[in-house]
């Protein structure tokens, strides 16, 4: 399988934002991902939850892992909770391995993430 | 907009400025004439005969004359004004060039025209004033002929003097305009010669002085006049000194231009930082011609110099490419080598050659002499060494063979000092032989050092020379130092040589905990700072036995058969596969997928495909990024072998290598996780996903080797993290 270019689509929900990630998650995705979070937190638009949809991400390497760690850590510093769904068991294993799960909760699907966010919102 | 106007002065402004200056020159010259007349009149009543008018009339006459000269100048300089205006319009090609020529001609001629006009005007004025007297004298009437002659002579002296002032100052005023109109088209007339102004000022000064003296002689000869000859003498002296000053001024101007050229030529001889376009500010006289010739010479030398510099740079690049990387890792050894050529190319060299799975050789050499010949010999010797060391034999035999070849090729014309060490990775045993090279040092991790004395003649002197060889046993943490004499002979600002004492004092400060490359770079930087670039190349090669690392396949608890078969399988095309890729991030994924497909085919019951793929991707990313520095012309090669129970994958790169150091303790992992720029997860992933991994080097280059065990799905204890 050839290299899939990274792309991203964002959508908002009350108190948060969903980032639908597409393609290969490598170091080259860093600028895009980080700038979205920086924009949101700097504007103070009250983003408290960041949900990453990784369903369409087939490949994550150490560079991509580092980007996710940076994103989740930046979020947690700014008081933003990070969630994700659509992570394959292999990558879930890798996320645990590098300690990413300390900053990013992994759920099986969007519904579960939203349930959790609702519960936190209450 | 206003800024542009200010920067590029409009022609009207420029022309007006020129005319103002000319008017000032004319008026000052005329005023000087009036003053001289008045001063002479005050000095002696005799001079009253010259222009016997009140000061006001004289002043008005001077003003009129000044304005008249300005009008003449405006008419004569018309082509100059139009060409100056044209400079602010788009270029006009051929016609503009002829116009420039015409304008330049007018500019050059104007001072001469004014000079001649002034002299003629003086003559005419004298004739007009004294016409009656001259007529009476001719008619034999009662007129004092001598006195009349004296007055006319005095008047002419004054006008010629004013003409010189005009000539010199107008030339000076027009000079910037002349420069502005450069470059001059070829074939300009001789008026630009520096000889003409010199001759004119000199001759005029001479004539003025003679006229003054003639006047003095006439007055003295006149029997009725009670005059003071000293006063006439003072006047003559005044004219002489003033004339001489103007003459000196013209001469000095010429001298200044010559000096500028001489400075340029000196700079050219010096060879560096050549001044460019110096001639642009020089007029079209002989100095200008010389400047143009000089400029051409300078450009030619610059071109030659630049091409030589380019070639040397190329030679330097070739030389650097011949040398191995400065930081290398081989088994449990780390090698740091630095070669600083004194000029672009040098005669120092070093090499590290892998001699199979358990041996490698290091070498340092120094060719006698410097510059290109030394560099050529160095390149040849490096290649000879590579082929000879692979032909087997001990270091002393290699040196003997190299010596014979060099003696045959060069006779007595080149000698090279070389130190060669062959290291056995299995027992850390070093065989070392030296051909006239400085004694190496062994520095233990406790900080003790000792010189290894072993030397024979340099190669290239005696074809039958034999080379002494000795054996050393390196211990964990030992550093084996090879260096060249450029370091020992470095001289600091106080004039003290670095010497062996300096080297030993440095070795005593080495701490085993400090990274070897940092230690060496810091050391050489300090030597550079203290001693400057010096007069010779400086090369240092340090071999460090980093004791913490051992390649232990035994860790895997493999059977002897599996262990032994690993290296054999790599050569078996049915059991191993190979892929190469350019160093471009992203291309590693496709190769990893292919490996994954093959693994699924060979071990269908295993579910480690994704782990293998991720780990191999990380190894390849490391090779692309760190090994090959993302240079697309360098290749990463993956050789994989999937056996019955074990899969071994080697990822080769063309870089210097690294130690497989990875600290997995909790604190270190937390630090990594919490750093602002979390990196270095590749090795963590490799370490977690592969059952075992190591690094090494062989003839193909540096490799990272990953081992994967065949395990059934959901095997217990899989990847305990």
Image: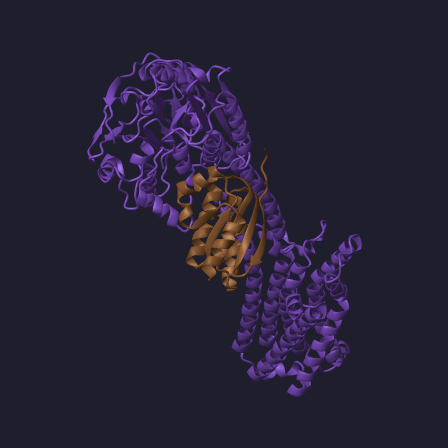
- Residue B584 vs residue B718: left or right? right
* Quadrant location, the C terminus of chain B: top left
Asked if residue B477 can be seen in this view, the reply is: yes
- Specify the chain shown as purple: B
Q: State how many labels appear.
A: 0
Q: Position of residue B204 (x, y in %)?
A: 63, 65
- The vertical placement of B485 against B121, above or below, is above
- Specify the chain shown as brown: A
Residue visible at 23% across and 23% down in the picture: B473
Q: Quadrant of residue B121?
A: bottom right
- Residue B359 vs residue B11: left or right? left
Q: Position of residue B331 (x, y in %)?
A: 34, 26
* Quadrant location, the N terminus of chain B: bottom right
Residue visible at 50% across and 50% down in the picture: A112
Q: Position of residue B198 (x, y in %)?
A: 61, 59
Return the residue found at the far top: B464
Return the residue found at the far right: B95
Q: Position of residue B229 (x, y in %)?
A: 54, 76
Please name whichever residue, B493 or B196, is drawn nearer the observer in this view of the structure.
Answer: B493
């Amino acid at each position: 399988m050839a290299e899939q270019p990274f792309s991203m689509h964002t959508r908002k929900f009350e108190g948060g934002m969903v980032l639908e990630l597409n393609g290969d998650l490598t170091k080259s995705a860093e600028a895009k991902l980080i700038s979205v979070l920086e924009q949101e937190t700097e504007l103070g638009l009250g983003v408290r939850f960041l949900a990453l949809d990784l369903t369409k991400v087939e490949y994550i390497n150490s560079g991509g892992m580092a980007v996710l760690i940076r994103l989740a850590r930046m979020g947690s510093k700014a008081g933003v909770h990070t969630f994700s769904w659509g992570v394959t068991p292999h990558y879930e294993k890798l996320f645990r391995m590098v300690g990413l799960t300390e900053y990013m909760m992994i759920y099986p699907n969007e519904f579960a993430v939203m349930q959790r966010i609702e519960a936190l919102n209450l | 907009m206003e800024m542009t106007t200010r920067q590029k002065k409009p022609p009207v402004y420029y022309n007006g400025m020129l005319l103002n200056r000319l008017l000032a020159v004319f008026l000052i010259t005329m005023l000087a004439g009036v003053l001289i007349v008045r001063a002479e009149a005050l000095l002696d009543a005799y001079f009253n005969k010259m222009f016997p008018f009140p000061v006001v009339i004289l002043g008005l006459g001077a003003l009129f004359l000044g304005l008249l000269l300005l009008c003449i100048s405006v008419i004569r300089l018309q082509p100059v004004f139009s060409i100056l205006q044209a400079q602010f319009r788009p270029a006009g090609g051929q016609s503009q060039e002829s116009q420039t020529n015409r304008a330049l001609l007018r500019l050059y001629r104007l001072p001469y025209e004014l000079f001649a006009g002034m002299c003629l005007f003086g003559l005419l004025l004298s004739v007009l004033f004294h016409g009656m007297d001259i007529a009476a004298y001719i008619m034999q009437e009662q007129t004092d002929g001598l006195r009349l002659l004296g007055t006319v002579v005095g008047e002419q002296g004054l006008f010629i003097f004013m003409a010189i002032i005009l000539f010199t100052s107008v030339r000076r005023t027009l000079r910037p305009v002349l420069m502005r109109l450069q470059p001059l088209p070829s074939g300009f007339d001789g008026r630009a010669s520096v000889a003409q102004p010199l001759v004119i000022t000199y001759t005029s000064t001479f004539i003025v002085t003679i006229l003054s003296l003639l006047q003095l002689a006439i007055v003295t000869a006149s029997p009725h006049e009670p005059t003071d000859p000293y006063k006439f003498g003072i006047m003559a002296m005044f004219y002489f000194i003033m004339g001489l000053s103007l003459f000196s001024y013209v001469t000095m101007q010429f001298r200044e231009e010559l000096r500028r050229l001489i400075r340029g030529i000196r700079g050219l001889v010096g060879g560096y930082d050549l001044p460019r376009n110096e001639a642009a500010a020089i007029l079209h006289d002989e100095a200008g011609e010389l400047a143009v010739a000089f400029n051409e010479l300078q450009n030619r030398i610059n071109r030659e110099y630049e091409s030589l510099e380019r070639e040397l740079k190329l030679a330097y690049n070739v030389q650097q490419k011949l040398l191995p990387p400065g930081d290398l890792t081989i088994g449990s050894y780390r090698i740091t080598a630095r070669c600083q050529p004194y000029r672009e190319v040098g005669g120092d060299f070093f090499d590290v050659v892998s001699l199979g799975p358990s041996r490698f050789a290091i070498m340092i050499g120094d060719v006698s002499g410097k510059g290109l010949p030394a560099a050529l010999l160095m390149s040849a010797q490096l290649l000879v060494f590579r082929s000879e060391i692979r032909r087997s034999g001990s270091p002393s035999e290699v040196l003997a063979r190299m010596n014979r070849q060099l003696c045959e090729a060069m006779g007595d014309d080149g000698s090279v000092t070389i130190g060669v060490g062959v290291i056995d990775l299995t027992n850390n045993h070093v065989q070392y032989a030296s051909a006239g090279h400085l004694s190496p040092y062994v520095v233990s991790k406790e900080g003790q050092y000792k010189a290894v004395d072993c030397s024979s003649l340099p190669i290239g002197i005696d074809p039958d020379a034999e080379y002494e060889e000795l054996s050393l046993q390196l211990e964990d943490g030992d550093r084996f130092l090879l260096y060249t004499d450029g370091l020992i002979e470095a001289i600091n600002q106080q004039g003290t040589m670095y010497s062996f004492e300096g080297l030993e004092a440095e070795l005593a400060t080495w701490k085993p905990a400090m990274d070897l490359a940092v230690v060496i770079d810091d050391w050489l930087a300090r030597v550079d700072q203290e001693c400057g670039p010096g007069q010779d190349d400086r090369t240092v090669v340090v071999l460090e036995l980093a004791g913490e690392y051992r390649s232990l396949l035994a860790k895997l608890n493999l059977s002897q058969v599996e262990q032994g078969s690993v290296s054999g399988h790599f050569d078996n095309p049915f059991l191993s596969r190979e892929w190469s890729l350019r160093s471009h991030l992203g291309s590693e994924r496709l190769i990893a997928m292919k490996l994954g497909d093959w693994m699924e085919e060979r071990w269908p019951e295993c579910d480690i495909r994704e782990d293998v793929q991720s780990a191999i991707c990380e190894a390849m990313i490391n090779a692309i990024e760190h090994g090959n520095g993302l240079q697309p012309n360098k290749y990463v090669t993956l050789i994989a072998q999937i056996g019955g129970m074990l899969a071994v994958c080697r990822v080769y790169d063309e870089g210097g290598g690294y130690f497989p150091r990875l600290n997995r303790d909790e604190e270190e992992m937390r630090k990594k996780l919490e750093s602002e720029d979390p990196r270095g997860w590749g090795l963590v992933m490799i370490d977690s996903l592969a059952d075992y991994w190591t690094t090494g080097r062989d003839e193909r280059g540096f490799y990272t080797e990953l081992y994967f065990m065949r395990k059934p799905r959901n095997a217990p204890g899989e990847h305990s993290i």
